[in-house]
Image (tube, rainbow, N blue to C red):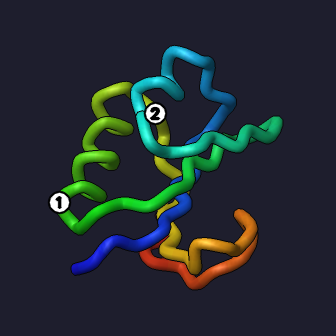
Amino acid sequence: MKSAHYEITVRGQMGAALIAAFDGLTATPSPAHTVLGGEIADQAALYGVLERIESLGLELLEVRRTASNTSPQGGSPCHPC
């Protein structure tokens, strides 16, 4: 698997300390959730991000593989939760 752009949605707004745990990803907050987005190198790196979400006690809502220039609403679903 080559590098791909992902948007990963978690419930609630993440504070600066939690966002810092996802170095290399951007965080886009809304009142109900936060979307982490960016290039992820391969499947192993994606699983690493998902594991970090779980270990921090965050609730995963959605994982979406997108074209790198789409908005958080665009793209095709990879694995809805």
Residue 40 vs residue 53, the one in the foreground: 40
Residue corresponding to mark 1:
44
Q: Residue at x 59, y 44 (%)?
A: 26
Mark 2–mark 1 Cα distance, whole angstroms, equals 20 Å
Mark closer to the chain start, 2 or 1: 1
Q: Residue at x 49, y 22 (%)?
A: 18
46 vs 18: above or below: below
Image position, residue 9 (x, y; %) = 57, 52
Task: Give the SS element for disc 2.
Answer: loop
38 vs 27: above or below: below
52 vs 63: above or below: above
Q: Amino acid at mark 2?
A: Leu
- Closer to the eye: label 2 or 1: 1
Give the label on residue 58, or none. 2
Q: Residue at x 36, y 60 (%)?
A: 40
Q: Residues within 10 Å of mark 1 (few under 14, many from 20)?
A: few
Give the label on residue 27, or none. none
State left or right for residue 12 relative to residue 42. Answer: right
